[in-house]
Image (cartoon, rainbow, N blue to C red):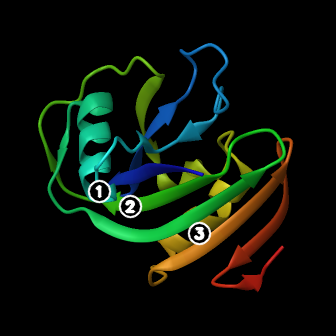
Amino acid sequence: MINTTLCYISRGDEYLMLHRVKKENDLNRDKWIGFGGKLEENESPEEGILREVKEETGLTLTDLKYRGIVTFVSDRYEGEYMHLFTAERFAGELRDCDEGEIAWIRKSDFAALPQWEGDRIFMKLLEDGAPFFSLKLCYEGDRLAEAVLDGKEIL
């Protein structure tokens, strides 16, 4: 299992999102996601997300909140533990990203964007202010086959 991070940065009624369109053979190709990536050796989830957001956006997060852990199981890809964060305050100047196009997206428009089915589940948890959670998402190809929230099957 690999360890990764993901952060959703918000500003009022908008999310800063990454449209993954620049990398070849990207498992997230054409999807809209937050910012993050793989943890480096000896790096905590907090250190990793701060580094990844800085590398991908040029921004320094100033109010990071650790919201949950998502376990991904797939019949195509290596298993993954994703440490999920949110942030509302940041410093610095936004810059282009070599992984995709960055855009501020109205929260009310977010659900209509191409994204993973499981992302919709944890985004709803984040939006609803859920306490720290553990979510297991099992994929068969690109189809979400099972979802388990805090040990209870929800799909």
Looking at the rendered image, the quarter that the C terminus falls into is: bottom right
Q: Label 1 neighbourhood size at 10 Å, few (<14), some (14-19), many (20+)?
A: few
Give the residue furthest to the front: 42
Q: Earlier in the sequence, mark 3 or mark 1?
A: 1
Q: What x and y, as percent, mark residue 60?
A: 16, 43
Q: Report the residue at 44% width, 50% height from top.
A: 6
Amino acid tagged 2: Phe
Give the quadrant of residue 65: bottom left
Q: Which residue is labeled 2 in the image? A: 85
Mark 2 / mark 1, whichever is N-terminal: 1
* Image quarter of residue 44: bottom left
Residue bearing mark 3:
124
- Which residue is painted at 41% across and 29% down in the image? 102
Q: Answer above or below: position of 33 versus 29.
A: below
Q: Nearer the viewer, residue 46 or 104?
A: 46
Depth check, mark 2 against mark 3: the one in front is: 2
Cα–Cα gap, marks 2 and 3: 14 Å
According to the image, label 1 marks what residue?
44
Task: Residue type at mark 3: give it.
Answer: Lys
Measured as percent of width and height from the top left, residue 19 is found at 53, 30
Height in image: 93 above or below 130? Answer: above
**Rendered view: 101 above or below 134:** above
Q: Position of residue 117 (x, y in %)?
A: 74, 53
- Residue 99, horizontal then vertical, whole percent: 46, 22
Q: Amino acid at mark 1?
A: Ser
